[in-house]
Image (cartoon, rainbow, N blue to C red):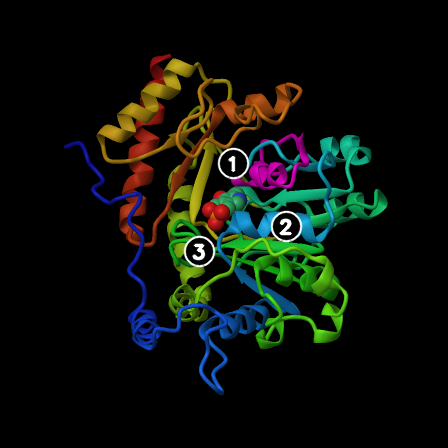
Amino acid sequence: MTEVFTGSFTQQEPIPEEGIEAALKVMRSGRLHRYNVAAGEAGETALLEKEFADQLGVKYCLAVASGGYAMGAALRAMGVAPGARVLTNAFTLAPVPGAIASVGAVPVFVGVTEQLVIDLDDLEAKADQAEVLMLSHMRGHLCDMDRLMEICRANNIRVIEDCAHTMGASWRGVASGLWGDMACYSTQTYKHVNSGEGGFLVSNDPELMAKATILSGSYMLYGRHLAAPDPSYFEEIKYLTPNVSGRMDHLRAAILRPQLRNLAAQCAAWNARYDTVDTGLADTPGLTRIARPEEETYVGSSIQFLLLDWEEAKIHEVIARCAKRGVELKWFGGKEPVAFTSRYDSWRYAPSEPMPKSDRVLKGVIDMRIPLTFSVDGCALIARIIKAEVSAVYQAS
Ligand SMILES: *Cc1c(COP(=O)(O)O)cnc(C)c1O
């Protein structure tokens, strides 16, 4: 009998009841805007910021409309000007180069290794081309953060971390988001907490965060924040920083607060599923698993593997055969960008030189989401299906 998987790869868990209750309360109050608070009320958004800052161990946190917005605000706060060059990953999601382009800056793409992290040799080679690195921990893979920071410090490069897939992850025990000058998170439905859309910007730098707060649309109400810099930091900044509206509202904040409290348990649940798929794929001919370094504490909300140097037709065959058995794999190696395509050469507004080593990796990356609605047994089944289909196509070639 051929086994078939029946779970949905786009179905996330429901919002916790506690979050639904809190959201109803906000709606019943009619006070949804973050600065619309009753006397003595801090508001869900300010409380969320304070709680996330405390949880991460960072001084300042600003809740915003999306992860992409957080990245744009970080670049603006750093004073990245039109025409400036910004280093970033060749393998990332479209909002990353998009944020760079949104301030009129120009992405300089840095290659990807077979471990799916930024190529630090390539970063070193390009280090003299920019003063800012927008570092995307794409698909939750953390590079050697010690070496990365060493390269950036030596070249006076400021680092913005894109932690869209690393909320809850760390390198050598130091949380992702605490390495760079600023860090951005997304609370969009497919990330580690779900408010539909939303994001966080965090930093220990009071000037950068004062600017980001005004940028986000705080007007002169920044004093109502609980995780913002002291009002003294706003004295000049408030006159000199434009309002580029991108606030979060109380409704989203209300549904995020209980999810954040439960983050560690959610991460453990992801890893139980990830590890089950990953070990199930061991010893599959033609398939390269991604080794996770000992220093890395990851959150396995998605899994990747490589079909290195495979013919395009064979990759299509694997994907089609897995799809028939209910397993939805994503491949971004084709010429034409599709769905959540994640390759530097898809973004033709940003000129790039070909990167043959990265192209080889990007042609072979297969990606799969792991929603928490999957059971661990379901994940074991998924691994059996992938292993069988990859083996069958590989052995026929
Ligand atoms: C989702 C994502 C973002 C941006 O998040 P949005 O909230 O959708 O704007 C940034 N980087 C990566 C790698 C992402 O996956």
> Closer to us: mark 1 or mark 3?
1
Q: Residue at x 67, y 20 (%)?
A: 353
Outermost residue, left side:
1
Q: Are marks 1 and 3 in contact (CB under 8 Å)?
A: no
Does 125 appear above or below 78?
Answer: above
Outermost residue, front side:
239
Could you give the CA–CA distance between mark 1 and mark 2, rounded to whole angstroms?
A: 15 Å
Q: Which residue is mark 3?
A: 192
Could you give the CA–CA distance between mark 2 and mark 3, rounded to whole angstroms?
A: 16 Å
Nearer the N terminus, badge 1 or badge 2?
1
Q: Residue at x 35, y 33 (%)?
A: 329
Label 3 Cα crowd, 10 Å radius (few <14 / some 14-19 / many 20+): many
Q: Amino acid at mark 1?
A: Ala
Element assignment for label 1 = loop
Q: Residue at x 40, y 66 (%)?
A: 259
Nearer the N terminus, badge 1 or badge 3?
1
Could you give the CA–CA distance between mark 1 and mark 3, rounded to whole angstroms?
A: 19 Å
| Front residue of 344 and 294 | 344
The circle drawn on residue 341 is none
Q: Which residue is mark 1?
A: 94
Q: Is residue 101 magenta?
A: yes
| Front residue of 314 and 106 | 106
Q: Position of residue 135 (x, y in %)?
A: 64, 44
- Asked if disc 2 is less than 8 Å from ligand 1, the answer is no
Q: Which residue is mark 2?
A: 161
Label 1 Cα crowd, 10 Å radius (few <14 / some 14-19 / many 20+): some
Q: Amino acid at mark 3?
A: His
Q: In the shown orientation, is residue 158 left or right of residue 312?
A: right
Q: Which residues are magenta?
A: 94-117
Q: Residue at x 35, y 26 (%)?
A: 390
| Residue 283 can be seen, yes or no | yes
Does 250 appear above or below 360?
Answer: below
